Image (spheres, helix red, strand yellow):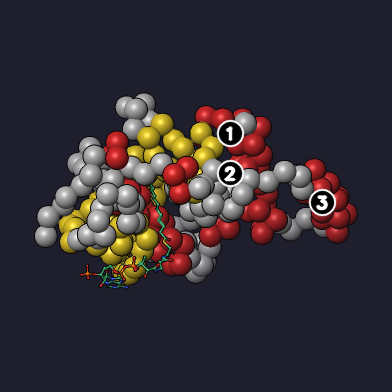
Amino acid sequence: MTVDAKPVAELPDPRDFGLAVVPEKEIPAELASLVEEVRSLVDAVAHTKAGAHELAAARDAVAAANACLQGDRHDVGTMVQQTWPDGRVEYGTLTNVVSGPTNAAAPPLRMEAAPEGGLRGEVVLNGTYQGPPGLVHGGWLAALLDQALGAAAGAEGMPGLTADLNVNYRNPSPLDTPLEVTARVTGTERRKVFVAGEVRHGGRVTAEGTALMVRMNLPGDGGA
Ligand SMILES: CCCCCCCCCCCC(=O)SCCNC(=O)CCNC(=O)[C@H](O)C(C)(C)COP(=O)(O)OP(=O)(O)OC[C@H]1O[C@@H](n2cnc3c(N)ncnc32)[C@H](O)[C@@H]1OP(=O)(O)O
């Protein structure tokens, strides 16, 4: 198998597929800080031992905030455009549940080019992502890997959908501490893109994944 990557400059523009695009730098700072606050709120609600009075006051405050935000919405499928310092342009789904910058349910995971090739990122999952006591839920580890593996294929100019994902859980992944996520393309065959990646805690692999991504059919591909 060979890795036959397209230059990143040839990445498709989501607008050509009828999708709206929001440049990340145009996301209001107030929205970014609201998302942070809500992430913290979800964790606080999940773990609170507050009494009835505080709970009722918090519910009313949240209900008021909720009412405040029930106006204009971005369409489902809206993409976010990130431009990296090296000029590389990358698209992702605005509300992607793993990496979406406006999704308070996303940890979020941000990936960047790794010196050794592929991508790497660091993420801290709070108690909202708990499975076994004190540990990250295995489904969320699979989600982190799925996202990172898809992003690795996208970064090589081969965005696609996951056809097959395999995860091996090697060691426990603790909450509230940095986890490193790495991913790279290992081969291609026609539209099939083979990818592999790991989650590490303190340098030790806690989960490893491999996936088959099937590359999107792009104009000029001739269906190959
Ligand atoms: C810039 C943005 C960055 C973007 C960065 C974005 C990161 C996003 C990461 C999140 C990823 C997700 O969650 S994706 C969401 C979860 N996945 C999905 O919803 C996908 C659902 N499945 C599908 O839509 C479809 O099955 C596809 C697209 C995967 C494949 O359908 P298709 O396009 O018709 O392709 P098809 O001809 O069937 O198959 C092409 C080749 O792949 C093989 N193949 C297909 N499926 C499988 C399979 N499960 N296991 C083995 N092999 C398979 C076929 O045998 C064939 O091989 P050969 O004949 O060539 O040998």
- The residue located at (51%, 67%) in the rendering is 131
Could you classify mark 3 by the number of other residues whose Cα lies within 10 Å: few (under 14), some (14-19), or many (20 or more)? few
In-image side of 219 versus 59 (left or right) = left
SS label for mark 1: loop
Does residue 104 appear in this view?
Answer: no
SS label for mark 3: helix
> Which residue bears the numbered disc 2?
102
The answer to which quarter of the image holds residue 187 is: bottom left
Say whether disc 2 or disc 1 marks the residue closer to the N-terminus: 1
> Which residue bears the numbered disc 1?
27
SS label for mark 2: loop
Ligand 1 quadrant in view? bottom left
Q: Judge by depth and name the residue closer to the eye, 9 or 85.
A: 9
> Which residue bears the numbered disc 3?
63
Q: Judge by depth and name the residue closer to the eye, 41 or 49.
A: 41
- The residue located at (54%, 37%) in the rendering is 22
Q: Pinpoint residue 15: horizontal percent, then vertical percent.
A: 47, 42
Q: Judge by depth and name the residue closer to the eye, 179 or 86.
A: 86
The residues bearing labels 3 and 1 have C-alpha atoms spaced at a distance of 24 Å
**Mark 3: C-beta under 8 Å from nearest atom of ligand 1:** no
Mark 3 or 1, closer to the camera: 1
> What amino acid is found at the position of numbered circle 2 in the picture?
Thr
> What amino acid is found at the position of numbered circle 1 in the picture?
Ile
Q: Pinpoint residue 87: horizontal percent, then vertical percent.
A: 34, 27
- The residue located at (43%, 61%) in the rendering is 143
| Contact? badges 2 and 1 (CB < 8 Å) | yes
| Contact? badges 3 and 1 (CB < 8 Å) | no
| Contact? badges 3 and 2 (CB < 8 Å) | no
